[in-house]
Amino acid sequence: MTSPADRRQEPRYAVAVAVTFESDHNFYTGLTSDLSGGGLFVATHQIRSVGERVQLHFTLPTLREPIEAVTEVRWVRATPMPSGGGEAGMGLQFLQLAPQAKEAIKAFLKKRDSLFFDVD
């Protein structure tokens, strides 16, 4: 089985911004640890099921207004990895994102260093 990292279409960038998401009866918060043009990882103990759609809001440091997105849970990490290898949370893929939000994310990430580098 292919790992989530092997299926990524775009590079990930280290970003720590607050994320809010809600269900029918609850309001949750989490913190991103990485972001790409295709999605983000949200560190949270409020894990949703793979395949579930999650509407979320987050604000980049370069924006005044929050970005709203409909995402899909692509993978989960139910418990933190030993020795600090990663927090509990879920990898979310953007499904619906306004064109101006896509451009804002792209511009923000352009100024950052990727988490992974290709080595020849």
Image (cartoon, helix red, strand yellow):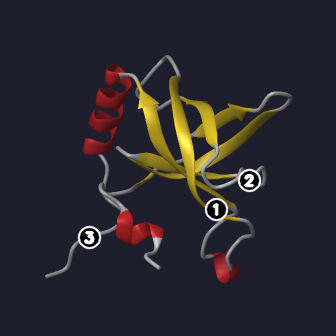
Residue 34 placement, left or right of 115: right
Query: Residue type at mark 1?
Result: Val
Q: Which structural element holds mark 3?
A: loop
Q: Quadrant of the C terminus?
A: bottom left
Residue under label 1 = 76
- Residue at left 45%, top 37%? 95
- Residue at left 45%, top 40%? 94
Residue 34 placement, left or right of 86: left
Measured Cα–Cα span from mark 1 to mark 3 = 24 Å
Measured Cα–Cα span from mark 3 to mark 2 = 29 Å
Q: Indicate which disc, 3 or 2, sits on the residue closer to the N terminus.
A: 2
Q: Residue 47 carries which label?
A: 2
Q: Indicate which disc, 1 or 2, sits on the residue closer to the N terminus.
A: 2
Mark 1 residue crowding within 10 angstroms, few (<14) / some (14–19) / many (20+): some
- Residue at left 21%, top 73%? 118
Q: Which structural element holds mark 2?
A: loop
Mark 1–mark 2 CB contact (< 8 Å): yes
Indicate the quadrant where residue 52 lies. Answer: top right
